[in-house]
Image (tube, rainbow, N blue to C red):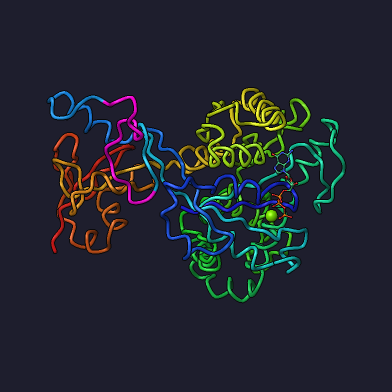
Amino acid sequence: MRIGLVGKPNVGKSTFFSAATLAKVDIANYPFCTIEPNVGVAFIATRLPCPCKDIRHRLESEGRIEPVRPDDPREGSLCEPRTGSCVGHRRLVPCFLVDIAGLVPGASEGKGRGNAFLADLANCDALIQVVDAAGTTDLEGNPQGANQTKDIAQQRIRDEIEFLGIELDAWISGLLTDGWTRGVRRVQAEGEKGLVSYIHERLTGLGATQHSVSVAFEAFKKRQNSLTSPWDWDETVITALAVEVRRILFPIHIGANKFDIAPADVLQGIEANGCIVPCMADVELALRRAASAQLITYVPGESTFSYESPESLSDAQLKALDHMLERLDANNGTGVASLIDTVLFDELDHIVVYPVQDESHWTDGDGKVLPDAFVVPSGIQAKDLAFKVHTDLGNGFIRGVDARTRRVVGSDHEMNDGDVLKIHAKT
Ligand SMILES: Nc1nc2c(ncn2[C@@H]2O[C@H](COP(=O)(O)OP(=O)(O)OP(=O)(O)O)[C@@H](O)[C@H]2O)c(=O)[nH]1
Ligand SMILES: [Mg+2]
């Protein structure tokens, strides 16, 4: 899973990125060295408790382990995550974030990082556009002063959202226009089906599928009053097609950042084709750093924190932290973790499943308890999950066993959130 952060300069993308990927030491055993500098891992809490909660429940009720001791640092968790962590059955799973810098007006014509920027976008499963909800910067990111009015801030937010759409449309339109007339003449005998396949072929690099292109094409047809033969379409018509393709391929979720200094009700009436979540990236960054320095106990996503030893803090530190506590309370959290959570689990409709080798003990071949948590599309079939675990498991798939119910399931069995699955495969 890879989420791209985009937006004009100076909105807080890098702050959001640093805050979200600032891993606590105990979860930093990720191969960071293999990741490019602008790619990081955010650890996101699964919505359901880790299945190690069920294991504990079973073992406790059979009298085979003692109840959780108050000083247990794992707060009862029994699993051994290969990546991420689990405390109090709150399991964290990795999600890659990419800080995609370089979006300026004219990117589709090669300005800024231009096409390299657009290619970065195409590699992401979802996009978050960070916008300046306080309206303190213009479209190029130049500071315009704090304390903007609601009207000005709203206008700037709308301009930002519109501008990313325009750049993406121009880019997709450019990919389609190039060689269009010759290309569509070649497929004219195949009718509409041929045309959709042709468009699909041109846009596979963006992650387009035959299905997504046909959905976009239907929407496009509905909006056009009269359509001439495709080889006669001018740039306006092709751009109208590009708009529909973009809506399907690149839903944009909005992180309305700098919400701590934004005018009241600034998001009222603002629309996007993804979700909109108020954020305070720099508050999140400050809190995670304070937590790393063991000044506070803060769980990302929560709307409060506690002081570890307030007597060791200076007056200035206390004042700053108290102020953040108020902001957290007012905004119901900083929005950083909840935005990623919403995109992953609501917008992309993903679930978390746990493949194991031993369906009785829920362990892998080395006896590790629930080492893997896979973030996959909701309803993924057992065999497709097997492929994600290992190609050999997918190819040799015989059957699965739902480790909770011990029921045997077939290759087309649809997985649910929190499932634990043993996969039998030919070796
Ligand atoms: N008030 C407030 N300021 C913020 C917030 N998040 C970031 N900032 C400030 O916004 C400024 C820009 O932050 P960056 O993270 O560098 O922005 P960017 O989008 O990465 O900018 P470019 O890399 O130039 O595109 C910095 O001064 C941050 O401290 C926030 O939630 N609230
Ligand atoms: Mg930056």
Residue displayed at 52% across by 50% down: 215
Q: Tell me the quarter of the picture where residue 273 sits.
A: top right
Residue range in magenta is 68-83
Q: Tell me the quarter of the picture where residue 73 sits.
A: top left
Residue 222 visible from this viewpoint: no
Q: Which of 334 and 67 is in front in this view?
A: 67
Q: What is the chief secondary structure element of the magenta stretch?
A: loop
Residue 243 visible from this viewpoint: yes
Residue 116 relative to residue 389: left or right: right
- The percent coordinates of residue 380 (x first, y second) are 33, 47
Say whether residue 75 is magenta. yes
- The percent coordinates of residue 280 (x first, y second) are 66, 36
Residue displayed at 82% across by 45% down: 137
- The percent coordinates of residue 60 (x first, y second) are 18, 26
The tally of labels here is 0
Residue displayed at 19% across by 35% down: 404
Which quadrant, please, contains the C terminus? bottom left
Q: Which of 103 and 296 is in front in this view?
A: 296
Residue 112 relative to residue 66: left or right: right
Q: Which of 427 and 10 is in front in this view?
A: 10
Say whether residue 126 is magenta. no
- The percent coordinates of residue 417 (x first, y second) are 34, 37
Q: Which residue lies furthest to the front in this view?
A: 312
